[in-house]
Image (cartoon, rainbow, N blue to C red):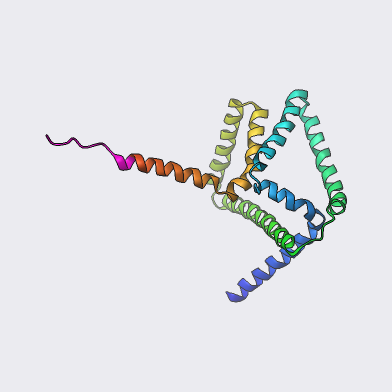
Amino acid sequence: MENDSNSETETQAVRLQQMKRDMESWREVLLPLNGLLHWEKPFYPAIIVGINTFIFALIWYFEPSVLTTFALLGLAISLIDFLVPIIGPNVVTAKWTGKQEAQYTDICCRILNAKTHFHNARTTMSSLKSEKPKIYFLIVMGTLVALAWLGSRMDNLCMTYFLVNLVLLIPGIRQHAVLQKYLARLLNVIKSFVGKGPKKMKAS
């Protein structure tokens, strides 16, 4: 068991080093992007929502076709993928510090963990499909029917806008435990109401 654990740890370390090498040309960009997504400053959520709103406002105003939208999205991704590794190291001229290296390692760890979770989810669904096909069918069909119903009730662009905002805000929500704070406040309010209870009548 100990040998298996050590082997798994070594494999994770090798994968992490490989991830760091693969993302090295992006590291100058990943740090500020990570700070933005994790709300290192209080106005960062407004910047995220503002940029996303501007992009969707352009789509709403010009009303491009689906093919044009995907083509423009592909062009933007291709330009970013080509230009960032070239421009990033030249723009950031400051010396790479140990603190930045630790932050970069942490980002690569999170990316690696996300890939692992995705792989595990895919493996779980594949196992469920082969071992319990009826349950797999119910889960997949139920999810697709729910999405189809939701899509028929909401405008496609509006729904996509809210979903993209949610995805972009999730890292900051998790980092600052926003849901936990509001749930704790809600529970405190409920407890205060329950604690008071009905007032007893005073005996005359």
Judged by its main secondary structure, the magenta piece is loop
Please tell me which residue is depicted at 67% across the width and 36% down the height of the picture.
49
* Residue 202 percent coordinates (x, y): 17, 36
| Residue 190 figure quarter | top left
* Residue 90 in the image: above or below residue 46: below
The single residue placed furthest to the left in the displayed view is 204
Q: Which residues are magenta?
A: 194-204
Please tell me which residue is depicted at 80% across the width and 58% down the height of the picture.
24
Magenta span contains residue 201 = yes
Across the whole image, how many numbered discs are drawn on residues?
0
Of 172 and 56, the residue lying toward us: 172
The single residue placed furthest to the bottom in the displayed view is 3
Please tell me which residue is depicted at 58% across the width and 49% down the height of the picture.
174
Query: Considering the image in quadrants, where does the N terminus appear?
Result: bottom right
Of 147 and 140, the residue lying toward us: 147
| Residue 137 figure quarter | top right
Report the side of 204 relative to 130 (left or right). left
Magenta span contains residue 150 = no
* Residue 131 percent coordinates (x, y): 55, 53
Of 6 and 183, the residue lying toward us: 183
* Residue 134 percent coordinates (x, y): 53, 45
* Residue 90 percent coordinates (x, y): 87, 53
Query: Considering the image in quadrants, where does the C terminus appear?
Result: top left
| Residue 94 figure quarter | bottom right
Please tell me which residue is depicted at 31% across the width and 43% down the height of the picture.
195
